[in-house]
Structure formats: structure tokens, C-alpha cells
Image (cartoon, rainbow, N blue to C red):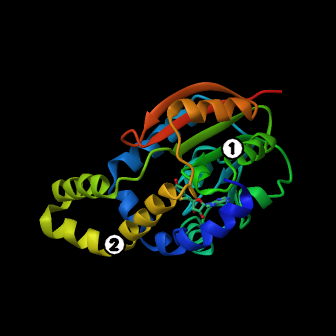
Amino acid sequence: MKVDQFETANLSVRPDWSAYATAYDLLSEHNPEYQALLQGFEAFLTTIEMPRLIYDIGGGTGNYTEIAARACPNSEVCLVEPDAGMLAAARSKLATFRNIKYDSSTLEDFDAPEAADLVICVHSLYAMPGQEQRLGDLRRLLRPGGLLYLIDLGRYMNVTDWRSYLFSNLKKELGLAGALRVFWQGREIAKQNNAILKAQKKGVYWTHTEAEIALAVAAAGFEILKQEPVYRGYSDLLICRATP
Ligand SMILES: C[S@@+](CC[C@H](N)C(=O)[O-])C[C@H]1O[C@@H](n2cnc3c(N)ncnc32)[C@H](O)[C@@H]1O
């Protein structure tokens, strides 16, 4: 889909990220798969040379920024997030960190002051217009040899499947009454996940197989160091190096 077509279609089916922001961390805290992704990222940081400059693109409420800022206290982390609700949630949560900057641009409009050593882009690429160009943008944000930590939702968001997965985990953790309470508090998430599915089905949001994302990433100028399906097979994790 071309960018102008995306923009027209996008207006009608696009999820409301600000509405999502209100309950995002509540359900993320109780989602073992989300927590596993965060732990994987934290473990990854221990395996690389300390990055000096890090961009977290589509960083949402700042969960990856927080890990990066804590694990790399001498690095500068810039959270790039266009949604006002998400950005406000991140700012208040991360207020005590002195090594975080905030930018409200989209990736396509982000005017990066300098090339980064590490770019994080988790579960946001699929929601952007023109993935080929966006992967090119991610490449340009990095110095040659810099690393891209990319996780992207590739398959249809099966809302019923996720609901029963989350509910059975919550019931184990909090009992039936606790699970019902969290589900009620987090009901906005189910609504927004339905909007994501709708956008995927209309082709407004990108879906891909493992092979398709690997091809797109390589075409944008990355060497893939590691790739695996994550998030119950719905998403792909790719750790990539920017080729010169
Ligand atoms: C599902 S959230 C992921 C947030 C965070 N990365 C995480 O994993 O917790 C997707 C985010 O992508 C952001 N986003 C959507 N379109 C974008 C664009 N064109 N450029 C940058 N971010 C975008 C949304 O505002 C939203 O906060």
C-alpha cells in the first residue's frame, strides 16, 4: 500500500494509541510473554559493547527505554514516540532518569541529531506506513556496524486466543476475582487489539512471515545476526547489524 493510501485508510481503522496507553502497562505487567520479551532485551544488553547513543523508536510507555537507561547509565537514550498519551505515560514513569530524552516525532519525521549505536524498535514497525522506507530510516539512524533490536508483530492478532491466554494466567496469579478485575481495568486493550486486527485485515497494518521480514530487513542494509519467532509465534525478533 502506498503512503497516501495508507493515510486515508489509516484514519478510519487506526487504533487509538492514547486510549491504549491508559491500560498498556497494567496488562503488560500481567502478560508473561511481554515480560519474557523485556527480559530477553535486558539479557541482550549484557552481550554487547556499551552503546553511547540509543534510540527507542515507537517506544510507547517506555519499557525498553527504562531497561536501556538503567542498564547503560552512561549512555543517552532517546525515546521517540508520536502518541501524546503514550509519551505522557513514559515521561511520568521515567521522570527520575537523567539519561533519557523524549521526541514526539514519528519515525518518518524524526530528525536524528546523530547516528546511534543501538536502535530499538519493538512492536511498532507494523503500525507505520511504508515498511520498506521505514526500515531504510532505521538503517540511517545507525552508524555502520550499529545494532538494530527489532521485534515486530507479523501475524494476525487473534484477540480470542490472547484473551484466553491472558485470562488463564491472571486466574493462576490472582484468582478468578483478581483476573476479572484486571480484565475490567484493562478492557481498553481488548478494544484496541480488535482495532489492530481490523487494520491488519485491511492491509493498513503490515503482516509478514518470518521469511518476508528477513528479506525486507536485509534489503534495507542489515546483516541479520539472530532471528526467531517470539510472542507465542505472533511476532519476529531480529537482531541486526547495519552494513557499511
Ligand atoms: C504496541 S506499541 C509498542 C510500544 C513499545 N515499543 C513496547 O513494546 O512496549 C506501538 C507504538 O508504535 C507507535 N507508532 C505508531 N506509528 C508510529 C510511527 N510512524 N513512528 C513511530 N512510532 C509509531 C505508537 O504510537 C505506539 O506507541
Counting residues from the N terminus, which is met first, the one under dot 2 or under dot 1?
1
- Number of marks in the image? 2
Q: Element at badge 2?
A: helix
Q: Is residue 196 left or right of residue 146?
A: left
Measuring 83% from the left and 27% from the top, which residue is drawn there?
244
Q: Is residue 184 left or right of residue 125?
A: left
Residue 230 on image: x %, y %: 43, 38
* Closest to the observer, 52 or 109: 109
10 Å crowding of disc 1: few (<14), some (14-19), many (20+): many
Q: Is mark 2 within 8 Å of ligand 1?
A: no
Residue carrying label 2: 187
Disc sitting over residue 119 in the figure: 1
Residue 114 on image: x %, y %: 85, 48
Measuring 13% from the left and 65% from the top, which residue is drawn there?
176
Residue type indicated by callout 2:
Arg
**Comparing labels 2 and 1, the label whose residue is closer to the camera:** 2
* Camera sees residue 192: yes
Residue 115 on image: x %, y %: 82, 43
Residue type indicated by callout 1:
Val
Residue 14 on image: x %, y %: 55, 68
Measuring 58% from the left and 34% from the top, which residue is drawn there?
212
* Camera sees residue 81: no
10 Å crowding of disc 2: few (<14), some (14-19), many (20+): some
Q: Please state the quadrant of the image where ligand 1 appears.
A: bottom right
Depicted 231 relative to depicted 222: above or below: below
